[in-house]
Amino acid sequence: MGKLREVEILLNQTQKVRFERAMERLQSLSSTTNNSVIVADSIPFNHDEAFLKGHGTSLVDGELLTTVCGVVNHVDKLVYVRTLRARYKPEVGDIVLLRYSFVAQRQSRWRVDLNSTQDGLLKLSSMNMPDAVQKRNTSVDELNMRNILAEDDVVCAQVGESQRDGSLLARSNKYGKLHKGQLLKVDPYLVRRSNLHFHFIESLGIDLILVRNGFIWVGEHTQSNDPMVVDDEIISSKTRQSILRIGNAIRVLSTLGFTLTLAVIMETFDLSNMENVQIHDMLGSEFHVWSQRGKLKEEHVHSKKNVKALI
Amino acid sequence: MEYVNPEGLRLDGRRFNEMRQIVAEVGVVSKADGSAVFEMGNTKVIAAVYGPREIQNKSLQKKDDHALVLCEYSMAQFSTGDRRRQKFDRRSTELSLVIRQTMEACILTELLPHSQIDIFLQVLQADGGTRSACINAATLALADAGIPMRDLAVSCSAGYLNSTPLLDLNYVEDSAGGADVTVGILPKLDKVTLLQMDAKLPMETFKTVFALASEGCKAIAERIREVLQENTKQLEYRRAA
């Protein structure tokens, strides 16, 4: 039985039974091909063909061994192991969310936390300034760095090159600094790579940003073109509740280990609204069991559709 | 005192080559990148791995293009019969070093330059064989965290009492004054990463005891593999669903 991670959930006996039954049925519905491997498993390969060793493999004494737990993938001639719970591996051009660790003023850059093996660096010159004027940064600007972005601020940026000592440089995106919302941390493998990172939920007026490094931003929609100008209005209570509800839906889904997409999150959100679950109750055990059964129903419908297509 | 009675049964009813019951679980500490609980009989250990992450203390970084592995072993004050007064004493420092060296040998540190891997081990119940349980728990936690390793490091202890080699000593047998051999191996690569012994043994006896401990290690490796496989499968099912 998989262990539930993020929240310490104590399922009582009936909940455990329903949970396990739902898990078993989910498993039977999912595809049966199972390529999961663990550390030091040998990967069978064809000795005659040439192949490339990718991540997670190593050649020892003519045998190909895995170095991590995960799923083996064959893409053309490349054999690699996709890890499940590892930290984010930054790739150039990815959009990521950053949280500021500290300001390294002498080199005029900020140290940022990317949920990766190392911290990233954001240079002062790559931040969009308030008046959108491209100018060289004077020493006054350097001293005022903390006014622009201080510790624990969240920024949306794009990954730039990696330096020789391994740290990354990031470029600030047009979305820049993010206000009025919450940042959630989930396992990076739960977010799939896609072109669309920013989702605007019109019915609630909420921005949802899902990025590959495992940070998720849920906040009030910002229409302002200039992200540096701080809007001092107080968010309405209704919007706040929606933000929290979506935040909790994401927390529940990441605890259960399901992939996070906009559709799934909205479904869980609707489920909680329909059943009139209190926001703080969403993190309780009962709602976890419900959302799992909800997922099961959706999978059932999905698989039935597939069957119909085959006939 | 009789540790092995004439029928060949030990104090807890085991035979000389029987191990204690193993219970292993992965993913118990939510904040950690990887974590595990490992129980061998009454000995219970929890391991939490953080990393690879940014190096916190640059002065500790010795090798520039390798990851820094830090290990901390501590026993909870309620883990032994009498409440322990100090959490960190010389034994804890020695064990931290030993376990760190064992794990460093099996982690592929050259793949993660400029980063730090923290392994925290806490003994919750101590009934002999804590260092073996710690190494096994650390292996599970590292695999859970997705840190690349050469192989699974497993460890087991064996001793020699009443002229019989005994596998997996518990606390009473350990304090009897006979030899205690702790072995750590990499099962797939068939290499030894840890070998410790206290007290003296003649060479031939040592070979028997060492062989017995290695067998025990292989059995633990099987169990660890089962747990990891089950865990990986579960995660993959849920993610793909």
Image: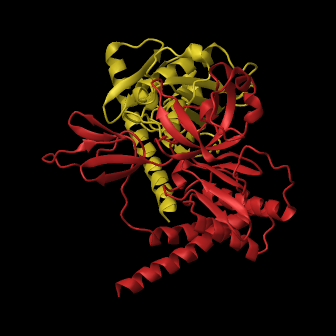
Chain colours: A red, B yellow
* Residue nearest the viewer, comparing B70 with B9: B70
Position of A197 compared to B8: left or right? Answer: right
Position of B12 compared to B122: left or right? Answer: left
* Residue nearest the viewer, comparing A226 with A113: A226
> Is residue B122 shown to the viewer in this render?
no
Farthest residue toward the bottom? A311
Q: In the displayed structure, would residue B204 be above or below residue A173?
A: above
> Is residue B113 shown to the viewer in this render?
yes
* Residue nearest the viewer, comparing A107 with B2: A107
- Which residue: 71% across, 47% down? A227
- Which residue: 72% across, 26% down? A141
Position of A206 compared to B13: left or right? Answer: right
- Looking at the rendering, in which quadrant would you find the N terminus of chain A? bottom right
**Which quadrant of the figure has residue A111?**
top right
Give how far across and how far down residue B89 sits, in percent. 67, 15
- Looking at the rendering, in which quadrant would you find the C terminus of chain A? bottom left
Q: In the displayed structure, would residue A181 be above or below residue B126?
A: below
Instruction: Count how many numbered circles sit on residues in the image.
Output: 0
Q: In the displayed structure, would residue A228 be above or below residue A292?
A: above
**Which quadrant of the figure has residue A123?**
top right
* Residue nearest the viewer, comparing A261 with B204: A261
Give how far across and how far down residue A175 sits, in percent. 64, 49
Farthest residue toward the left? A48
Give how far across and how far down residue A119 sits, in percent. 58, 31
Give how far across and how far down residue A240 sits, in percent. 81, 59
